[in-house]
Image: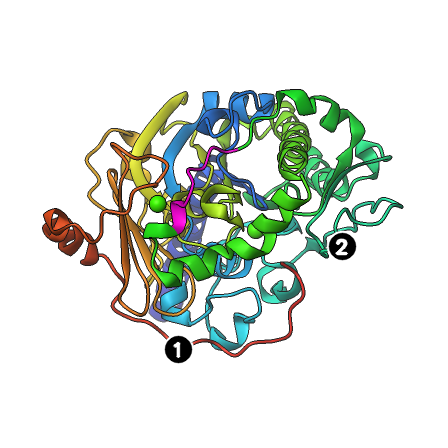
Amino acid sequence: MKRIAFTTYSLCFALLGLLAANFTSSAQSAKKYNVLFVAVDDLNDWIGPFGGYKGIKTPNLDKLAQRGIVFKKAYCSAPACNPSRASLLTGIRPSTSGVYHNNQPWRPVLPDAVTLPQYFTANGYAVFGAGKIYHDTFNDSASWPAYFPVPRSPIPAKAPVHGFEHFDWSPVSATDEEMGDYSIVNQGIDFLKKDHDKPFFLAIGLTRPHLPWYVPQKYFDMYPLSDIVIPKIPANDLSDVPQAGVAMAKPKGDHKFIVEHKQWELAVQGYLASITFADAQIGRLLDALQRSPFSENTIIVLFGDHGWHLGEKEHWRKFALWEEAARVPFIVVAPGINAGNVTSERTVNLMDIYPTLVELCGLPTKKALEGMSLVPLLRNPQLAWPHPSVTTHGFGNHAVRSERWRYIRYKDGTEELYDHDKDPQEWKNLANDTKYVAIKKELAKWLPTVNAPDAPTKKETEE
Ligand SMILES: [Ca+2]
Ligand SMILES: [Ca+2]
């Protein structure tokens, strides 16, 4: 009898406990932030809020910047799609994993990695991805309970301008609706129109402005050739760059071809048109969020996966350690944390996205993430932040970027040093000037101490 009474008592307590737990959990989930995670492929700093190209038309990114915090000195961990995305989504740096290039599948070398979307799923979030989040060929089925792949964009009937696969630009006779990115964004819009009983993590990855720069004519028309300004480069800019850096620039490849075939203005026009096309798609997605019931409690993170050279250092594309390849657009909207329309000049890295989102959303702290939570900067963008940003390109080659300096050290020990206070274009390499020995030593402290050997490669044609 006594025993039964005790059991009933315990049961009542247990029930009360359960009710209380339930109440707390529903109260918490009502407050939980959603996440809209937007990756834009090959978008450099030529957008309104980052000021890389005067005259660029990015009205939607401008509007987003007004609502958020613009990290003006944001850098990728690696200047290539696969290592940049794999590292930011796993929290494991390229120099730790050995995934340095686009031809190295990352999952086989990181079988136990819990990716950012996996971590959100494990913590009760509804997770959905569409478009290019990982590098195309190495998407990760473990990351996505539901996923919409990248549709093929229209390819114009005419042959590429100079026969380099992917390296081409041209208006296409297609409507926005016929472009792949339009359908990717539609997936996001449809998701936002639905009810969600759980907080969500929605990842949308745009493929423009990645090459080829094929977008509808109207976007090219916004940039008449007569108005195009090509990057200014001094003669012999590479003469003070060590051989390892010159090899990354490959001046006798793309750049020579572009100049000889009078394609520079046309290429710049194609990139600008592709950026404005991407901006229009981003606008559709952000407007859908604004119209949805989730507008007030959704964190937005928008970033480019690395920068892009359009002739600076006689270099094209990414795949290098200079400012143009390493700097990325990075905007965060954090409702309730930051009122928006602010910029931060602190050096941050895309590796910081994972721990930042974990903290903002109140998830349990995730161990062994190599980035740093930026929540203190979201609260106070001017906070002192003595954490230089590291970018790695290939085994043993790194750049360390502080608020003032860029220090590059290649695997053979050769170096570059640029003073951004005096030389924002990185034209004058100061590394061999003895005046800067102490500066270099200070920056070198941030070089990764682990340099993992190259992960196995797989044939890869995408550039
Ligand atoms: Ca990319
Ligand atoms: Ca130079």
Q: In this view, does 442 lie above or below 66?
A: below
Camera-side mark, 1 or 2: 2
Q: Is residue 154 magenta?
A: no
- Which residue, given by chain and number where applicable, does mark 1 sit on? 453
Q: Say whether disc 1 or disc 2 marks the residue closer to the N-terminus.
A: 2
Determine whether the residue tagged by mark 2 lies in a helix, strand or loop: loop
Count residues near mark 1 (Cα–Cα under 10 Å), then give few for <14, some for 14-19, many for 20+. Answer: some
Q: Is residue 67 above or below residue 45?
A: above
Give whichever of 111, 271 is nearer the camera: 271
Say which mark, if any, is on residue 105: none
The image position of residue 99, as x and y in percent, is: 47, 69
Q: Tell me which residue sits at (38%, 63%) in the image.
A: 244
The image position of residue 37, as x and y in percent, is: 54, 43
Q: Tell me which residue sits at (40%, 53%) in the image.
A: 321
Task: Determine the image quadrant of residue 283.
Answer: top right
Give the extent of the magenta segment: 231-238
Label 2 CB less than 8 angstroms from ligand 1 = no
- Which residue, given by chain and number where applicable, does mark 2 sit on? 163
Give whichever of 75, 374 is nearer the camera: 75
